[in-house]
Amino acid sequence: MPAQPATVFTIRPSRRVAARTPPLAQGAYAHLIQQLLEGDFKPGDRLSVVELAEQLQCSRVPVMEALKRLDTEGFVEIIPQVGCRVARPQATEVQDFFELFAAVEGCVTRLAAARRTAADLGAFKVLCRRLDRDLKVAGPPAACDPQYRRANLEFHTLIHRLARAPLACAVAAGMWDRSDFFIKVAFGSLYFGRRVRQSHLAIRRAIVAGDPEAAQAAIAGQLREVGRAVATRLTLMAQAPT
């Protein structure tokens, strides 16, 4: 897979983590995250340090540093004396994760609805109109899956900015890639289903109306429902004959 820069729409993890990571390792990490979320990797796929270093035109050291970080975050598994492979998420842990994610992102979205200004609303409406226009012509998920993911991240990135809560947003931001990874593993796509579109519309209305409770309920309800669906799918996958 060709190396590509991380998308500008990605909600970043805590800046402190990035600041501690050497530039080459950070680049390798960004490449691997993008391939895990938008490429063809599947749970259990082996990851070759040698091949990844060749793709990125760097030594093995930054690749190993990136894989170690991905291992601690649950995206890959490093097995001593064996190698590295894409992680196989466990259904119960995934559902627990989405419960936590719903609580944290719900708090951020509630703050955004409470703190947005008139100027914020202008920028928010412009973004929403553009995303609607882009997604209308995006095509089927098989062809444009990354575009759906990036649109979702851009939407929530702006909401994080409206919240004006750096510490809370840093916690929530670190969960988006993991959420997308679990969804991609379970369903093979990050396509906007009807439930996600309805949630986006409810969040928009709540932020425009300045209704914190409705904003929080919309995103928290969506994420809990997604968590249940992903956990159910992972359970069925684990039970299927190999």
Image (tube, helix red, strand yellow):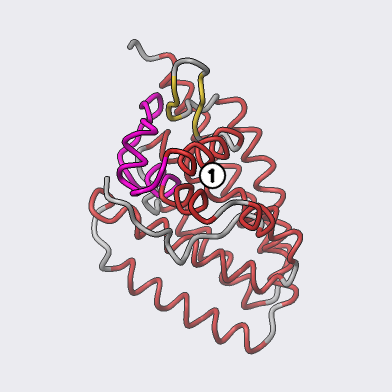
What residue do we see at 42% from left, 56% from top?
149
What residue do we see at 48% from left, 28% from top?
87
Which is nearer the eye, 110 or 26? 26
Which is nearer the eye, 36 or 149? 36
At which x and y percent is residue 54?
A: 31, 42
- Image quarter for residue 207? bottom right
Is residue 36 positioned above or below 79 on the image? below
Which is nearer the eye, 6 or 146? 6
- Image quarter for residue 42? top left
At which x and y percent is residue 84?
A: 45, 26
**Quadrant location, the C terminus:** top left
Is 61 contained in the magenta span?
A: no
Image side of residue 104 versus residue 132, left or right: right
Q: Amino acid at mark 1?
A: Ser
Image side of residue 209 versus residue 195, left or right: right
What residue do we see at 56% from left, 70% from top?
204
Q: Return the residue found at the far top.
A: 241
- SS class, disc 1: helix
Which is nearer the eye, 119 or 174? 174
Is residue 142 positioned above or below 165 on the image? above
Is 54 contained in the magenta span?
A: yes
At which x and y percent is residue 67?
A: 50, 37
Image side of residue 43 versus residue 67, left or right: left
Read off the magenta span.
32-59
Image side of residue 141 versus residue 32, left or right: left
Give the residue pinned by disc 1. Answer: 179
